[in-house]
Amino acid sequence: MAFLTESTPERGVASEIVPGIRRIVARNPSLMTYHGTNTYLIPRPSGFILIDPGPDDSVHVNDVLLGTEGRVSTIILSHSH
């Protein structure tokens, strides 16, 4: 069985992964996070929905604020640690 692989994504940049959904990969690669924690951004008229906002890291928070133009309306957590 072949393993799924992904080339190393650019970290800290909002990249469209499918139409209407962007992802920011945090700068925290590890065995647990693979290339880095994924934060998903979904634009809505009222602001962005964030799914899994990522680590409590000032650089990542700034990357998310840049990627959403500071317009975050909703944060969804899909799991806890």
Image (spheres, helix red, strand yellow):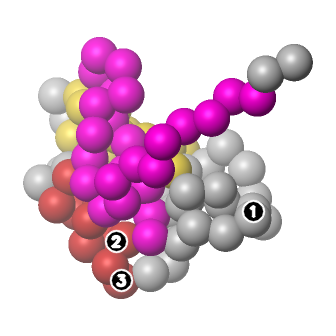
Magenta stretch prevailing secondary structure: loop
Q: Which mark is residue 24?
A: none
Query: What is the C-alpha distance between the residues marked 1 and 2?
Result: 20 Å
Residue 65 in view of the camera: yes
Q: Residues within 10 Å of mark 3 (few under 14, many from 20)?
A: few
Image coordinates of residue 28 in percent, x first then y, are 53, 72
Type of amino acid under label 1: Met
Residues shaded magenta:
3-27
Give the SS element for disc 2: helix
Q: Which residue is mark 1?
A: 32
Q: Nearest the camera: 2 or 37?
A: 2
Q: Which residue is mark 2?
A: 61
Image coordinates of residue 74 in percent, x first then y, are 39, 45
Q: Is residue 74 magenta?
A: no
Image coordinates of residue 56 in percent, x first then y, are 50, 78
Query: In this picture, is 17 found above or below 41?
Result: above
Q: Quadrant of residue 19?
A: top left
Q: Is residue 10 magenta?
A: yes
Q: Which residue is mark 3?
A: 58
Return the residue found at the far front. 2
Type of amino acid under label 2: Val
Q: Marks 2 and 3: in contact by CB < 8 Å?
A: yes
